[in-house]
Image (cartoon, rainbow, N blue to C red):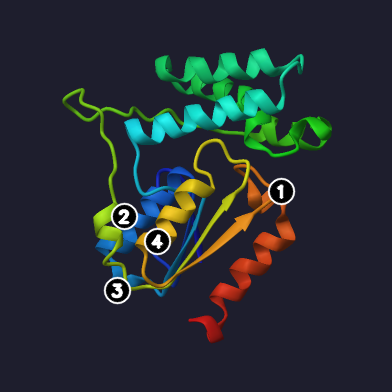
Amino acid sequence: MVYVEPVGTGGSDRLTGHSHGGFVAQYHALHRPDQLAGIVLYDSAPVTGGEHAAEVMCSVREFATRHTGHPELPSVLEAFAAIPSIGDDEAMLAAARGVLPASIADYWADPQRWAPLGQSLRVTYVSGLDEHGVPDSVDDREPLRTLSEPALVGAGRYDVVCGVRWAEELHKLIPASRLVSLEHSGHFGHLEETERFADEVAAFVTPDNA
């Protein structure tokens, strides 16, 4: 098994993609299916672009409503607002740390627990434009209908970036897929509900499920 970061990595028997890495894993599965026995997608989506951005903004508004009056809410919303104008690694890292409270379901219940995660974040800015300056979006909806390998699709209920709405769509698109919703997680279910996440992945990759 290999965990796919945004820049991608090599092949394996079963491929796991998280967030932007999910798009890399999907691409690999669609173009090199012979190299895989299955794919695990957590907090991924079948599309990027305007539709995806609108869904993120809806989720951010829901987050703001849930935490109305919290003293740190304005700084989180400012971090989200800054993302479209980012153009380098330093600004991307600041934004990633700024939106962390919205990326974890219960962040403000125990912020000290998550402080090390924020400090350990390492990010690389990747432009959303192609070589011609045109938005480089992804739409894997039709190709994913042809994916024959088994898939485990999951999402955190409170993920504002690629939540259950997108996991449900992936599940409907991929014929041999199973859907898992982590009801107490945001964007980092492998850290927020570690045992549940590990159990689901372990069950998926065992020989009986191959």
Considering only order in the chain, which callout, 4 or 1, is on the residue closer to the N terminus?
4
Q: Which residue is mark 4?
A: 172
Give the structural element (helix, strand or loop) at label 2.
Answer: helix
**Percent x, y of residue 156:** 61, 48
**Percent x, y of residue 145:** 29, 63
Residue at (50, 16) in percent of width and height: 81
Q: Which residue is mark 1?
A: 184
Q: Which residue is mark 3?
A: 34
Residue at (26, 34) in percent of width and height: 136
The reply to whether the C-beta atoms of the residues labelled 4 and 2 are less than 8 Å apart is no
Judged by depth in the image, the label closer to the viewer, 2 or 1, is 1
Q: Quadrant of residue 149?
A: bottom left
Q: Amino acid at mark 4?
A: Lys
Residue 113 is left or right of residue 40, and the answer is right
Instruction: Using a 10 Å C-alpha cutoff, classify the residue at mark 2 as few (fewer than 14 neighbours), some (14 to 19) or many (20 or more).
Output: some
Instruction: Using a 10 Å C-alpha cutoff, classify the residue at mark 1 as few (fewer than 14 neighbours), some (14 to 19) or many (20 or more).
Output: some
Instruction: Using a 10 Å C-alpha cutoff, classify the residue at mark 3 as few (fewer than 14 neighbours), some (14 to 19) or many (20 or more).
Output: few
Give the structural element (helix, strand or loop) at label 3.
Answer: helix
**Percent x, y of residue 6:** 43, 43
Judged by depth in the image, the label closer to the viewer, 3 or 4, is 4
Residue at (35, 35) in percent of width and height: 51
Instruction: Using a 10 Å C-alpha cutoff, classify the residue at mark 4 as few (fewer than 14 neighbours), some (14 to 19) or many (20 or more).
Output: some
**Percent x, y of residue 157:** 62, 46
Cα separation, mark 3 vs mark 4, equals 22 Å
Q: Quadrant of residue 193?
A: bottom right
Q: Amino acid at mark 1?
A: His
Cα separation, mark 3 vs mark 1, equals 35 Å
Q: Amino acid at mark 2?
A: Tyr
Closer to the camera in the image, 132 or 204: 204
Q: Which residue is mark 2?
A: 27
Give the structural element (helix, strand or loop) at label 4.
Answer: helix
